[in-house]
Amino acid sequence: MEPVNLALLVSIFTGLLILSWLWMQYRFKLKMRLLIDAPGTRHSRNDLFQTLFEAAPECIKLQAEDGLIEQINSAGLAILETSMSSKIIGQSIYGVMAAEYHTEYRHLTNRVFKGGTGFMEFELVTFKGKRRWLETHAVPLRDEHGKIYALLAITRDIDKHKRMTQQLVEQRNRLNTIIESEPECVKLQDQSGIIIEMNPAGLALLSATNPDGVIGHSVYEFIREEYQQRYKELTSNVFNGVRDNMEFEVNTVTGGRRWLETHAAPLLDSNGRVSALLAITRDIDGRKKNELKLRNQQQELAHMCRLNTLGELASGLAHELKQPLCAISSYAESAVMLNDAQGCHENKKVNDILHKIVEETARASGIINGLRDFVRKSSPVPQAIKINGLLDEILELMEPERRRWGIKIDVTIPAGLSAAWVDRVQTQQIMMNLINNAIQAINESPQSKKLLEISVLEKHDQLHIEVRDFAEGISELLRPHLFTSFFTTKPEGIGIGLSLSRGIAEAQGGQLNYQSVQPGSVFCLIIPCNIPRR
Ligand code: ADP
């Protein structure tokens, strides 16, 4: 209980006691008068007073103005821990009262001898040397002429009550000190989520300098939306008497984010009902971020393992395909030579086709070797490459897909561009991936949106190749993950295309970026021009 409330209670109680004592005195006088005035009565005023005086369970004493005790009842002697009235009657009250209360008691005595009443709490020292808390109510006693001749005091032993109150106050102070200096957040919250109390460590977790910005506010103003449902569940568990804990992220007062771990328990009132949720919360931001880093590293490791396997496979595949590809190429070349030898010049068309077979076989070997070299992380072999030719080759390869989905591809390449200085196969790989992704993004779109624009610009010794589609684009939530390994939204996707492409672009001294446009997406590949960078 608050000390203020306690003092109020004590004052009310004291007032009631005085009122009841005055009422009893009035009734007592009335009765005495009736008894004494009644004809043939056997009681004297003195007898009655004496009987009540002795039988009273509280200490009653008569005291002179200088503090000498004139009369005291048995209850008073019991408080003083003596049975001999001679030990105290005729002695000064100040002899048994603890010294620090003497001045205040003198004031009280003076007030009573001036006709007032008074109340005070003090400690006395009993004849056995024990300190004891008392509460006294004092009124003046008047003779038949109205002259005050004594102070009448009714005194109660409040030692137990006083010590309990003191203990409570001390306990509360101790608890407050512990909570205030506790390095972790301690908070009290009601069932609707309103923060009732929070210690300085808790305010610091929310980066709040002013408690008014937090206490009295709802926890849901700080807990990030994705954790609110679970937090509501935790609150409901605690108010059903079950402890619970969880990890969640908060938005701090200064706009930052922080990971916290909370352990919540029910706080019971004196009737055993849950009056609040008591939570101890700690900062786990560092731990959480390390976990995330570790998980990413593990994914990277898994990625590397897969690439290694892919490297082995590609190397085996290259070896296996080398023979048939060589054979196809030689047969095609032999067929051309045979045609030429036989002078079948009218078969020019057949010869052209045969030349194409030789070229495509060489390209197939190049792609397989390139893939093997790439996954083995062999260094790129940059060379001067005309970007028109490279794009033509890719668009030719993508032609069946383009036709399948009825997509229009517009290519804008200004004349007189410098040659790029890149690894041919690896750059093809990037462009194929970008165009393939764009086709997949628009293949379900209405016909009006089935357009893909490829444009090239030269800026500061670099070529900017932009691939733009007019599909739905990429949501803000997903954008941070775009270039992360194994991020995919496609049921059949692997999610390594963009991350590999960015890796290749950077290894060649270039970049691969995403820009959001309305409608659609733009992926921009930046590659160096024909100036070798070392
Ligand atoms: P995958 O194609 O196997 O999913 P990528 O790394 O190539 O792997 O792409 C990762 C993700 O990026 C895709 O699953 C898709 O969600 C998104 N994405 C890539 N390009 C586009 C695009 N042009 N439009 C919309 N989303 C795209």
Image (cartoon, rainbow, N blue to C red):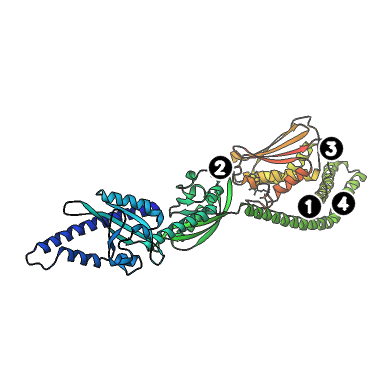
Amino acid type shown at disc 3: Pro
Residue picked out by circle 4: 331
Dot 2, crowdedness within 10 Å: few (<14), some or many (≥20)?
few
Q: Residue 515: image x %, image y %? A: 65, 39
Amino acid type shown at disc 1: Val
Label 1, label 4: how many angstroms apart (C-alpha)? Answer: 31 Å
Residue picked out by circle 1: 375
Q: Which mark is residue 198?
A: none
Name of the residue lying farthest toward the right: 341
- Camera-side residue: 435 or 260? 260
> Which mark is nearer the camera, 1 or 4?
1
Label 2, label 3: how many angstroms apart (C-alpha)? Answer: 48 Å
Identify which residue is drawn at 35% across, 65% down: 80
Q: Residue 103: image x %, image y %? A: 37, 51
* Label 1 vs 3, first from the N-terminus: 1
Amino acid type shown at disc 2: Thr
Quadrant containing the C terminus in the rendered view: top right
Identify which residue is drawn at 38% across, 62% down: 159
> Which mark is nearer the camera, 1 or 3?
3
Residue 288: quarter of image? bottom right
- Camera-side residue: 1 or 8? 8
> Which mark is nearer the camera, 2 or 1?
2
